[in-house]
Image: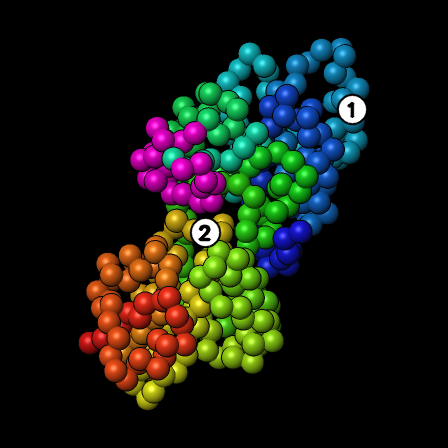
Amino acid sequence: MPKLYIDEYKHVLKGRTIFIACREGIFRDHFSSIIMDIKFLNRLGLDTHLFHNISNRFANQKLFAEIGSKLPRTCVIRVSPDQDFYRSVLEFSKKAGKIIFLERKYLLDPQGYRLNSVTTRHARHHIDSYGDLIGNLNFKSIIEQICRRIESGHVERVHILPAGKHSIKHELFTVEGSGTLIANNFTENFTAVRTEEDARIVADILKTCRNLGYLKPRSPQYIRRHADCFYSAKIDGIVVGCVEKILIDEKTVELAALAISTKFRNQRVGLFLIRAFLEEMKNQGYSTVISVTNNPKLISLYLSMAFEKCCPATLSKRLSRSPGKELFVKRLN
């Protein structure tokens, strides 16, 4: 069960209208889970609109009454089945802070992995490579409409989630997320880890990334003891990535424990963290930054940023503590 950060994420959602849109078949299949998630948002005082396209037949009147009784604080909008469901949601008169489309699956990259978050430019660029991600062959054509609505400012962010238990809750209140986010308003801030809550989120991100095999374990106790050596990238005031400073000598520091929340991978947060860390170390008076890794993506990133793969004699002892890994050096001008 992913850890929920209710208070941290709630303040970002306050004052923003959340649209939840779900077609009839999916809504019926996951009715209880969807209702529970929306009721959870209502208990937090969030403004919610539910869109569905269940036909207005006599046999469905009991279901409509049940939706109304269980979601008294949610504005429920029925889209006629003969109308374009997605266009009706995207072009609704009220501006949405978030639109959540509940589908069969999330967006997939060409390798079949989940796309956690993408900009409109990235979404357009890769639109032809997306798999049949949601059991809806028409959805690829909706991507362009989504991008236009985001770029026009009519909606801030669009989420594409697999309908299911806690899907909305996990997308909005965990660092991992549960689906794909399309947005352009990612603004990163680089700051030292100062609060107990930030330290806990850093520990969770590191725990998730450790499972990939590229990071050594760092316990929450270790992070709290060395909090002054950890820096974070924040989006919407929430920690989404981290890096650790390890002192080598009076002029050299190691860039370690670089990790990104799964929700914000592929958004260049790692590049932002490295650049910000290098600038901060330069401001602190250091002349050299090193890093030891066997992560292929990180190695490519270092080489693109003019890190040098080498092992000066003065650093051989450090490298010997990490067998199977390579050492990269960046001189700070």
Position of 57 with respect to 322 (left or right) is right
Q: Where residue 49 appears, x then y in whole percent?
A: 62, 34
Q: Which residue is found at the position 31% from the left and 35% from the top?
A: 125
The relative height of residue 1 versus residue 125 in the rendered view (above or below) is: below
Q: Would residue 300 be seen by someone viewing this image from the given angle?
A: yes
Is residue 100 found inside the magenta-colored segment of the image? Answer: no
The relative height of residue 236 versus residue 202 in the rendered view (above or below) is: above
For disc 1, the neighbor class at 10 Å (few under 14, some 14 to 19, many from 20) is few
Q: Which residue is found at the position 32% from the left and 67% from the top?
A: 326
Q: Where residue 185 appears, x then y in whole percent?
A: 41, 49
Which sits earlier in the primary sequence, circle 2 or circle 1? 1
Give the magenta range. Answer: 111-131
The relative height of residue 297 versus residue 75 in the rendered view (above or below) is: below
Is residue 117 found inside the magenta-colored segment of the image? Answer: yes
- Residue 19 lies in quadrant: top right
Numbered label attached to residue 264: 2
Q: Which residue is found at the position 28% from the left and 62% from the top?
A: 302
Q: Nearer the viewer, residue 13 or 32?
A: 32
Q: Nearer the viewer, residue 34 or 7?
A: 34
The relative height of residue 294 versus residue 58 in the rendered view (above or below) is: below
What residue is disc 1 on? 65
